[in-house]
Image (cartoon, helix red, strand yellow):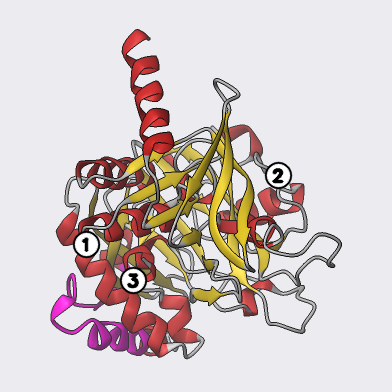
Amino acid sequence: MTAGLYARARLLGELRAARQWDLVVIGGGATGLGVALDAAARGWSVALLEADDFAKGTSSRATKLVHGGVRYLAQGDIGLVHEALRERSTLLANAPQVAQRLGFVVPAYRLRDLPFYGAGLKAYDVLAGRRGLGPTELLSAQRTQQLLPTLRTAGLVGGIRYWDGQFDDARLAVLLARTAIDRGAVLLNHCAVTGLLLDGGKVRGLQARDAESGESVTLRARCVVNAAGVWVDAVRDMDRDPGAPPRAPMVAPSQGVHLVVDRAFLPGTHALMVPKTSDGRVLFAVPWLGKTLLGTTDTPRHDLDREPTPFAQEVDFILREAARYLAKAPTRADVRSVWVGLRPLVRPSDDEVENTKALSREHTVVVSRSGLVTVTGGKWTTYRAMA
């Protein structure tokens, strides 16, 4: 405990001592940590402040997949898929201790689904090029059942196997934080930003409060980056004149629910992917740390709870869809744990958004008139490109 307190006191001392930072980052999730590491690796002086714990929000509540986005390919978003496949390859190469390839099987219960989904996944291979993780294959019904032993077999005509990636999001976040520190950055969690320093209409730094000591700290910076995830609009709202109306929000939060059930529901080493559920979403059943992870949903959320909980209909939806494909239907009694991530989806500038499935998963970088840099959107797979 003494060493921990000393380390925190030392970090606060470093924050106070610096006359001016090249870059101060707000937010210790995937994007903020990536920005801090990239800037520190370039030799700039960097400080990062996180209001809670590193990766406390969405960045530790993902589906644990590092992927190119098969569903984005179906939506015709070729650019996003190509970028994500490139970044998937880089992430797997840079962090093999927390990321590896994973085989996915798409079951087919209609003969026409085999060439339809097979062609789409072959296109996925083509976009990946030499960065591909393995060839897409058409499978017989027998081979499909071998790879997914608990799959419902009634009407099964075959399947398609393709390859994507899986990773431990929380461990990767810690690795990024430690690497940024090794490169000279100063990172402090549980230190919330309380305001921006404005001088002549320009952002010159920020003010923050350490949750442990209650101490206020002022950081001056050449540039401030707002990487607060679904909370970026709260930071942007600090960047306005007193009495001015709130800024139009950039983010339309979307809730993704994940359920954990026993491994017995999907034994083996392959994941199940259903490209089109009853409402047009994608369903995954993924092996994860000796259990099976089921998800996910895409539901608009208008509040920004630090500990979001699933809506009852979301849990019912996942269980109902899983029951259509698994021989033994999971029930609420089988759910061992639940987590919910809030996606920071970029909102169209003048539209009211109710269907978050239609919003872009691409990231956006906006520089305000005051010089505040806001980066939001995207996903774990493309964190490095965003940074």
Whether residue 325 sits left or right of residue 139 in the image: it is: right
- Could you say where residue 345 lies in the image, as x and y percent from the top left? 60, 69
Q: Identify which residue, 23 or 172, lies in the foreground.
A: 23
Does 131 lie within the magenta span? Answer: yes
Residue beneath disc 3: 385
Q: Identify which residue, 218 or 77, lies in the foreground.
A: 218
Residue beneath disc 2: 305
Question: How crowded is the residue under tag 1: few (<14 C-alpha within 10 Å), some, or many (20+)?
Answer: few
Please provide the residue range marked out in magenta.
Answer: 118-141
Q: Secondary structure at mark 2?
A: loop
Residue beneath disc 1: 42
- Could you say where residue 140 lies in the image, as x and y percent from the top left? 28, 73
Q: Give the quadrant of residue 119.
A: bottom left
Magenta region, main secondary structure: helix
Q: Identify which residue, 58 or 314, lies in the foreground.
A: 58
Does residue 41 appear in the picture of this structure?
A: yes
Q: Upstream in the sequence, badge 2 or badge 1?
A: 1
Q: Secondary structure at mark 3?
A: helix
Q: Upstream in the sequence, badge 3 or badge 1?
A: 1
Q: Is residue 256 above or below residue 55?
A: below
Q: Amino acid at mark 2?
A: Asp
Whether residue 163 sits left or right of residue 387 in the image: it is: left
Q: Upstream in the sequence, badge 3 or badge 2?
A: 2
On the rendered image, what quadrant is the C terminus found in? Answer: bottom left
What residue is rendered at 67% in x and 56% in y? 317
> Spatial distance from mark 2 to mark 1, Cα to Cα?
35 Å
Q: Amino acid at mark 1?
A: Arg
Q: Give the quadrant of residue 146.
A: bottom left
Q: Give the quadrant of residue 309.
A: top right
Q: Secondary structure at mark 1?
A: loop
Does 192 lie within the magenta span? Answer: no
> Spatial distance from mark 3 to mark 1, Cα to Cα?
15 Å
